[in-house]
Image (cartoon, coloured by chain):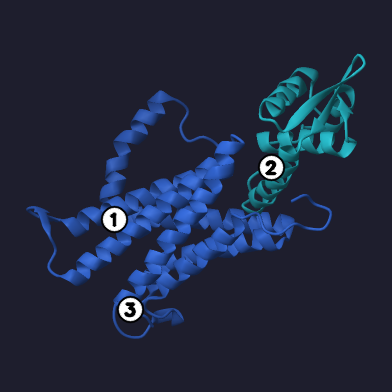
Amino acid sequence: MFGTWGSVVLTAVVVLLAVWAGLRLLGPARRFGERRLGWLSAFFLLFALTQAILVLETILLIAGPPVRVREGFSLLEGLFWVRHSVFLVALLCAVAALGVPRLGRGAEDGEKAAQVVPFFLLAQPILLVLQGIGLFYLVVRAAHNHARRSDPGSLRVAIGFALLLLGHLSPFVVEPEGPAVLGIPGGGSALFVLAGTLMLLWSTGGGRSRAGEDG
Amino acid sequence: MAKEYRSRSRILLDVLRGVRDEGEAGVTRLLLLANLSHPRLTEYLKELEDKGWVVRVEEGKRSLWKVTDEGVRVIGELSRVERMMQDFGLDF
């Protein structure tokens, strides 16, 4: 559907939108000392960083042969790992904003977890699956919230996270070249992510006043 | 019964709305409206006064509280934060 440059442009727009959403949340988070808004803001800003790295990766890929940082390790590979690690941290920030029971029970557990982390980061499929699980959790939470509230705002958030999940999954159900599997056209990933980010950005404004409310 | 969770922003909004709706409100009335203990209410009122969102008006021996123009703007802002946090499923 889009060429590679089309995807780059779409992803660059996502970067701007995500930064906008993050800064929009950061204002009230600092003004009113609302920590969870701060976590949500961190999610958007880190997500913007991952998309910016994706733009850089794609441009490097188009530009020509991979730049070797050292033997056996290219700059592209480095960017790949940084992007996915940052995305995992972004998802953790979103989960922290929504509030879940704390992981681990003390310093000892924390140390054990720290020893395990590099193994996760070295295992690409596990990394991608973890991201999928994180996004799926956000979708389920948002859908549950919408089921409780039945409000256009909560619906926007649920659709926004669902589109991000689709954007994450679509590269795995699309043939690298040729017609799409499951009807998702090539380049759709960037479009899904853009649409999802737009929906979420829309919700960070708090929407319009409803009858009988302030503001 | 478990007490309903209220975020910091929600408490600020409840106090500000309470003061605004009453026009000029005394501490006793605000205790009921904001559903806070006396020490916590005093703490919040001091913070709101320091930020210039409410002013203290002395009426005889009584101290009354009144929302400032900035306070009215903050109520609007906090209401938007309330809707946004609820949209994202964050407890407000």
Q: How many marks?
A: 3
Bin the neighbour count of mark 2 within 10 Å (Cα to Cα): few under 14, some 14-19, many 20 and up.
Answer: some
Distance (Cα) linking label 1 and label 3: 19 Å
- The tint of chain B in the picture is cyan
Q: Is residue A50 above or below residue A95?
A: below
Left or right for A106, reference A61: right
- Rendering colour (chain A): blue
Closer to the camera: disc 3 or disc 2?
Answer: 2
Relative image position of residue A187 (x, y in whole percent): 37, 76
Q: Quadrant of the N terminus of chain A?
A: bottom left
Tag of residue A10: none
Instruction: Look at the numbered disc 2 and give the secondary structure of its residue.
Output: loop
Residue A99: in sight, yes or no? Answer: no
Between A49 and A110, the one nearer to me in the picture = A49
- Residue type at tag 1: Gln
The residue identified by callout 3 is A175
Return the mark for residue A124. Answer: 1
Q: Residues within 10 Å of mark 3 (few under 14, many from 20)?
A: some
